Image (tube, helix red, strand yellow):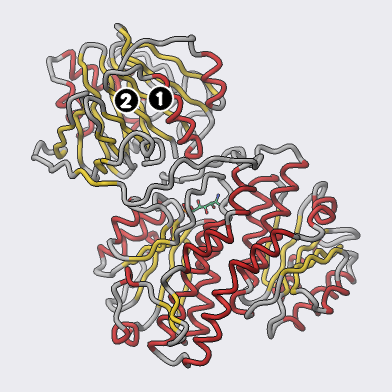
């Protein structure tokens, strides 16, 4: 949520700032701005996308240090004045901030009483005025920022630049900041994506740490002034720069990345001989796996829905109770944490604030959490310490696709691993391993020939609302289909376990209402057919996702088939048409597919 970029060195800062903003635009895209130290501080900002900012920038901005920001609004609507950087009254200090200042109202009121004219509605602006006051009282930049932050409550990743000092001060508390270390130049960013092309050496700021960045080096210290080691690490996974190639949108590219992403997730983790799977990073021996009383998975959005699939797979294969929790609710319900229970935090970005807060709640109560994460070295990955990476590669589109399939795949690997340590037979383990090995090829063959997607789009594009149904393991898949269509096509969708439909949502159905049904060839299929009949009897139009060759297709108005696999792996295939339906519906409705309104890729505020 909000992206921060900074540069200090010997080259013109603006090209990197703009390029960096573009790489971070997925974190927020309602407004953006830059401040470059060019004699004075030169500030340009506006509402809209990065392209709008670029269109108002002068052709050339001199200046070899600067900071920049792309925003996802929390306090105050997207507008030119609310865009960052925010500036002190004398124009000599500029600040960019990611996070939420919880006591902003108190700070703003005090400043206003003291005669400061605030320009924006944001929580962030108060900070720059407080820093300015400290500087006016003779503080050095680092001390001024430290003293200001002592008065603030909340979360921040922030950068401050000064007209009169050749330094950028950064601080982190709850919102990520990474410093790229170079020779005579240093870069700052909210994540490593903008840094990868410049340097492999990075300092990931810890919570409670400030950094004084000059072209010559980086000095870190804690908020209380104590020394803090600036640990330089080498980027462990270089994804390179995510490029669109021939695809019109990242979402479509990422849908088509799925066969390769799945291969990456499965590679080296399957043992056909023993019918087993190995996620070494979990650090769990078979003995420990036998003693786990229950498994809890935490996530938001698509990660939550992948967790809902995962918990069913774990329960079925390992016969151990497993639950999926909404991260944003978790810590507020004062959960009971059992010592030996196994907790998984599931997240693509590894930066989701709600999930991070849930992890901290568990750790505070003495529990351990393992990450199921895509972004290597992300905050959640580091907070958990142990876990497994899902290896999807960079996911740029706001609508998550390949992360879902890889999260499900990784959790299935875990289900086999814990299952084999308990009661899952070697024979069943071998069946599953074989089926998993075939999966990337099946995904590929479906994507090569995706069936009647455009007929489904035609049936959905003008709908007032769409009902998605599925049973058992397909219920979370139906929810994922609904989430995708809602978030990028802006069509209201409802997703229900098929059997629940008759207890309420059926009242919505009328002649022509579109109902999307996910019905793989599993033991629940006949029950789902009954639900289809109930819908059809009320005039609904059925769009069915089913397994190839299955006569259930006759029950549908529009039938889309996916290849056959072991029923427990079906979510990885049945979700594919739902992703494509959402993509093409959004496209036909002229939506901004990769950057849907009001959303951001990484939600780093609670
Ligand atoms: O990075 P995470 O997996 O933790 O993100 C969780 C959700 O914010 C994310 O899945 C969101 O719901 C997506 N936009 C769904 O497509």
Q: Residues within 10 Å of mark 2 (few under 14, many from 20)?
A: many
Check if mark 2's residue and mark 1's residue have beta carbons within 8 Å: yes
Q: Is residue 321 visible?
A: yes
Q: Which mark is residue 568?
A: none
Q: Quick check: 385 above or below 137?
A: below
Q: Label 2 to label 1, Cα distance in Å?
A: 7 Å
Q: Is residue 99 visible?
A: no
* Picture residue at 58% right of the left edge, 61% below the top: 259
- For the residue with label 2, is its CB less than 8 Å from the closest atom of ligand 1? no
- Residue sticking out furthest to the left: 226
Q: Residues within 10 Å of mark 1 (few under 14, many from 20)?
A: many
The quarter in which the N terminus is drawn is top left
* Disc 2: which residue: 7
Q: Is residue 245 left or right of residue 412?
A: right
Residue 288 picture location, percent across and down? 29, 83
Q: Is residue 495 left or right of residue 40?
A: right
Q: Identify the element where label 2 is drawn.
A: strand
* Picture residue at 23% right of the left edge, 45% below the top: 206
Quadrant of the rendered structure where residue 19 is?
top left
Residue 452 picture location, percent across and down? 82, 59
* Picture residue at 64% right of the left edge, 48% below the top: 252
Residue 473 picture location, percent across and down? 61, 75
Q: Identify the element where label 1 is drawn.
A: helix
Circle nearer the N terminus (2, 1): 2
* Disc 1: which residue: 17
- Residue sticking out furthest to the top: 39
* Along the viewing direction, whichever of 445 and 207 lies nearer the viewer: 445
Q: Is residue 519 left or right of residue 540?
A: left
Q: Is residue 337 left or right of residue 241?
A: left
Q: Quick check: 286 above or below 390?
A: below
Residue 183 picture location, percent across and down? 22, 29
């Amino acid at each position: 949520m909000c992206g921060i970029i900074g540069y200090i060195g010997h080259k013109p800062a603006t090209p990197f700032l703009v390029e960096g903003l573009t790489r971070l635009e997925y974190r927020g895209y309602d407004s953006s701005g830059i401040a470059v130290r060019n004699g004075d501080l030169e500030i340009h900002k506006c509402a809209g996308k990065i392209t709008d900012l670029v269109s108002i920038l002068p052709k050339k901005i001199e200046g070899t240090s600067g900071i920049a920001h792309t925003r996802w609004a929390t306090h105050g609507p997207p507008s030119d004045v609310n865009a960052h950087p925010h500036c002190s009254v004398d124009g000599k200090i500029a600040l960019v901030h990611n996070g939420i200042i919880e006591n902003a109202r108190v700070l703003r009121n005090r400043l206003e009483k003291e005669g400061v004219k605030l320009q924006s509605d944001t929580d962030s602006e108060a900070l720059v005025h407080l820093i300015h006051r400290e500087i006016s009282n003779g503080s050095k930049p680092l001390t001024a920022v430290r003293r200001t932050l002592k008065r603030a409550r909340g979360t921040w990743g922030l950068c401050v630049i000064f007209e009169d000092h050749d330094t950028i001060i950064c601080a982190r508390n709850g919102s990520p900041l990474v410093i790229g270390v170079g020779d005579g130049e240093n870069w700052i960013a909210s994540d490593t994506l903008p840094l990868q092309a410049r340097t492999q050496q990075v300092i990931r700021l810890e919570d409670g740490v400030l950094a004084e960045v000059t072209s010559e080096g980086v000095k870190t210290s804690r908020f209380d002034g104590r020394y803090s080691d600036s640990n330089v690490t080498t980027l462990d996974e270089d994804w390179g720069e995510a490029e669109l190639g021939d695809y019109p949108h990242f979402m479509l590219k990422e849908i088509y990345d799925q066969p390769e992403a799945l291969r990456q997730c499965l590679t080296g983790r399957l043992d056909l001989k023993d019918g087993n799977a190995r996620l070494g990073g979990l650090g769990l021996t078979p003995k420990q796996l036998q003693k786990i009383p229950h498994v809890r998975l935490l996530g938001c959005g698509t990660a939550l829905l992948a967790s809902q699939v995962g918990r069913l797979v774990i329960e079925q294969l390992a016969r151990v109770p497993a639950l999926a929790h909404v991260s944003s609710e978790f810590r507020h319900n004062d959960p009971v944490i059992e010592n030996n229970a196994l907790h998984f935090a599931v997240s693509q970005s590894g930066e989701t604030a709600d999930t991070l807060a849930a992890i901290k709640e568990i750790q505070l109560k003495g529990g351990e959490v393992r990450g199921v994460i895509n972004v290597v070295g992300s905050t959640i990955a580091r907070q958990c310490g142990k876990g497994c990476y899902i290896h999807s590669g960079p996911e740029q589109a706001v609508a998550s696709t390949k992360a879902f399939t890889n999260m499900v795949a990784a959790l299935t690997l875990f289900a086999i691993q814990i299952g084999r340590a308990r009661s899952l037979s070697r024979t069943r383990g071998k069946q599953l391993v074989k089926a998993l090995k075939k999966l990337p090829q099946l995904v590929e063959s479906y994507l090569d020939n995706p069936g009647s997607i455009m007929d489904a789009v035609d049936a959905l594009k003008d709908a007032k609302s769409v009902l998605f149904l599925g049973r058992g393991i397909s219920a979370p898949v139906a929810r994922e289909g609904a989430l995708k269509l809602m978030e990028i096509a802006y069509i209201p969708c409802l997703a229900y376990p098929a059997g629940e439909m008759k207890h309420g949502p059926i009242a919505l159905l009328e002649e022509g209402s579109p109902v999307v049904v996910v019905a793989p060839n599993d033991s629940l299929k006949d029950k789902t057919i009954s639900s289809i009949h109930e819908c059809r009897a009320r005039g609904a139009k059925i769009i069915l996702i089913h397994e190839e060759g299955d006569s259930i297709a006759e029950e549908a108005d529009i039938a889309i088939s996916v290849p056959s696999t072991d029923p427990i792996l079906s979510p990885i295939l049945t979700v594919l048409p739902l992703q494509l339906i959402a993509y093409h519906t959004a496209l036909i409705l002229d939506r901004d597919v990769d950057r849907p309104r009001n959303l951001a890729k990484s939600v780093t505020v609670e």
